[in-house]
Image (tube, grey):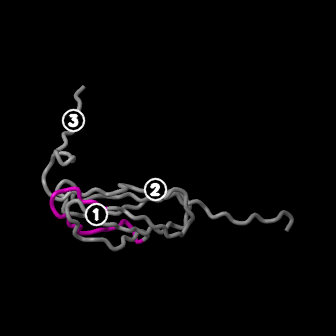
Amino acid sequence: MALAVLALAPSGRADGPAGARLAVEPASFDFGPVRPEKTLQKELVLRNFGDAELVIKKVSTTCGCTVAGAYLKRVAPGASTTLRIAFTTPAAAGRTEQTVTLETSDPERPKVDVKVAATVVASRKPAGRPGG
């Protein structure tokens, strides 16, 4: 069985093509159990660990229930920007997952998908009184 070895450059990053390099923190996020029809927010950090300016060309989402807020469109090497997303949970109970897609000038990963998930739990209705 062969072992894969990842060589690190003196900068501490893996050897690879020069240019802008995107890291998204967190790479995905699960809100866990949530109530229906609630708007939840999460901040993603978009970090450029490359040696050239990172251009964020486009941010899109899979549905209108997930909205991306303001962010820097150009990120210098070693710098970062924050992308705030708002995720509105559906009315129906169950697991829901949406995707935020980032299109950037990173030559290795020009498109990055960030999964945002939650499990909608049914609202509890007050119990009726017996014989009432």
**Amino acid type at image mark 3:** Val
**54 in magenta:** yes
In this rendering, the label closer to the viewer, 2 or 1: 1
Which residue position holds label 1?
80
Tag 3 secondary structure: loop
Q: CA distance from mark 2 to mark 1?
A: 22 Å
User: Circle 3: is it few (<14), some (14-19), or many (20+) Cα within 10 Å?
Assistant: few
Q: Nearer the viewer, residue 86 or 18?
A: 18
Indicate the quadrant containing the C terminus: top left, top right, bottom left or bottom right: bottom right
**Amino acid type at image mark 1:** Ser
- Tell me the residue at 25%/62% (across/down): 79
- Extreme-bottom residue of the structure: 70
Q: Which residues are magenta?
A: 46-64
Which residue position holds label 3?
5
- Extreme-right residue of the structure: 131
Which residue position holds label 2?
30
The first of marks 2 and 1 along the sequence is: 2
**Amino acid type at image mark 2:** Asp
Q: Which quadrant would residue 83 be assigned to in this image?
A: bottom left
Q: Position of residue 8 (x, y in %)?
A: 19, 42
Q: Nearer the viewer, residue 14 or 107?
A: 14
Residue 21 in the image: above or below residue 55? above
Q: CA distance from mark 3 to mark 2?
A: 31 Å
Q: Position of residue 60 (x, y in %)?
A: 32, 68
- Tell me the residue at 21%/35% (across/down): 5
Tag 2 secondary structure: strand
